[in-house]
Image (spheres, rainbow, N blue to C red):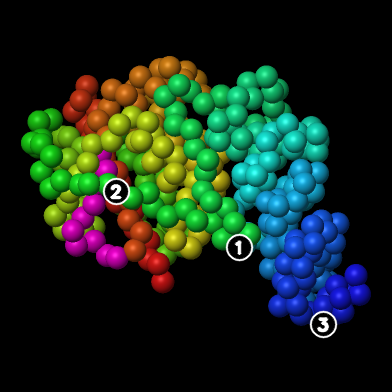
Amino acid sequence: MADLDRLLVDGDLDGLLRLVDEACDANDWEALERIATRSRLAVERGHQLWPAADHAEHRLALQAPASFAAAAVVRDATTFGVAPLAEVAASSHPWADLEPHLPSHIGAIRAVVAHERVARGEDLTALDLVDDPFGLPLRLAAWEPTTDGPTIGPYAVDDPVPPPGSLQPNPGSSDLGGGVDRPAGPEAETARIALRDLVATWTEQSRGTATSVAVVGSGLDAARIAGRATDAGPVSFRPLATDEAFGLLAWAGASGGAHGRRRGAARGRFEAWWCAAALGGLDGPNEAWPPDPDELGNAVAEMGWWRWDGAQRPAGWFLGIAVDDPADGLAWALAASDHLS
């Protein structure tokens, strides 16, 4: 590719990005792979062409046949791609097509791709994974919602905050204890941190903030206290069904916020299990990981879940979740926001 040679010598990033589009339009995946690998090496000549390399790898994972997509995942060299390549490849290729091209010696990468497919509804329980970073069941539990994940396109990921739905200012009175700020014990504090950590990428890689609280009271109490702590103003609520609530946890765990890099659906599912286990008291030192799916599902179903929003919170992304455990009178709430610009 004479054009590629010239563009690399000139350090022409815009030209390389146009060449990526041309290779994709022509289904010339070998050429696209050369752009990806050679642009990465241009740093040896003083050219910072990794954005072209990252974009080429993303397009390979998304659009190319499974052999090229898997090779991009194996290289796993992207720096600032819009989503993990394991998720990108899994969003457009079934496991049966990818597996032959994911050798066993890359155990952790192979496992992440498998979990990405599981998050999208594939049953891979027959697999024997090595170096599995998540350890979750390779089939969705009956109570876990199936998701297709975000819309991953050639240039961006479309994954905004799920709409809050119809919220009500006074859905019911508090009946668990009045919403007193709790000097949280170890278990309540662990759950509070797990809830906040769902949106760690918002605060670490984007422009977001996150506050979580633990209280003696109901989920409504917890949301009101979180609203006051974040100057969100009067809050409105909507009860969540179990599957919607868990899906929201998984969405938050996968999200990169308004400007950060997604962690991926597999990581989102892991974070949701971790958070739900902490909220349900199934994360103690004597508890096995992962929790028994039925036991965790029962714990999630026994809790009350709420979506909430504040009338005066800043514009931009906002996610308000509240949860209570009637058995012990504890409740938690998360207020996460991120700026669009």
Q: Which residues are magenta?
A: 306-315
Q: Residue at x 44, y 44 (%)?
A: 251
**Which image quarter: residue 194?**
top left
Q: Residue at x 48, y 63 (%)?
A: 259
Q: Position of residue 273 (x, y in %)?
A: 45, 32
Looking at the image, tell me whether mark 3 or mark 1 is earlier in sequence order.
Answer: 3
**Is 64 on the left or on the right of 164, as rendered?**
right
Q: Is residue 229 visible?
A: no
**Is 24 on the left or on the right of 169, as rendered?**
right
Q: Which residue is mark 1?
A: 155
**Is 285 on the left or on the right of 132, as rendered?**
left
Q: Residue at x 34, y 63 (%)?
A: 316
Q: Amino acid at mark 1?
A: Tyr
Up/down of 246 relative to 27, above or below: above
Crowding at mark 3 (Cα within 10 Å: few <14, some 14-19, many 20+)? few
Between the C-alphas of marks 3 and 2, the distance is 49 Å
Between the C-alphas of marks 1 and 2, the distance is 27 Å
Q: Is residue 125 magenta?
A: no
Q: Position of residue 161 (x, y in %)?
A: 39, 52
Looking at the image, tell me whether mark 3 or mark 2 is earlier in sequence order.
Answer: 3
Crowding at mark 2 (Cα within 10 Å: few <14, some 14-19, many 20+)? some
Q: Residue at x 44, y 61 (%)?
A: 258
Q: Residue furthest right?
A: 2
Q: Are marks 1 and 2 in contact (CB under 8 Å)?
A: no
Q: Which residue is mark 2?
A: 164
Kind of element beneath mark 3: helix
Q: Which residue is mark 3?
A: 10
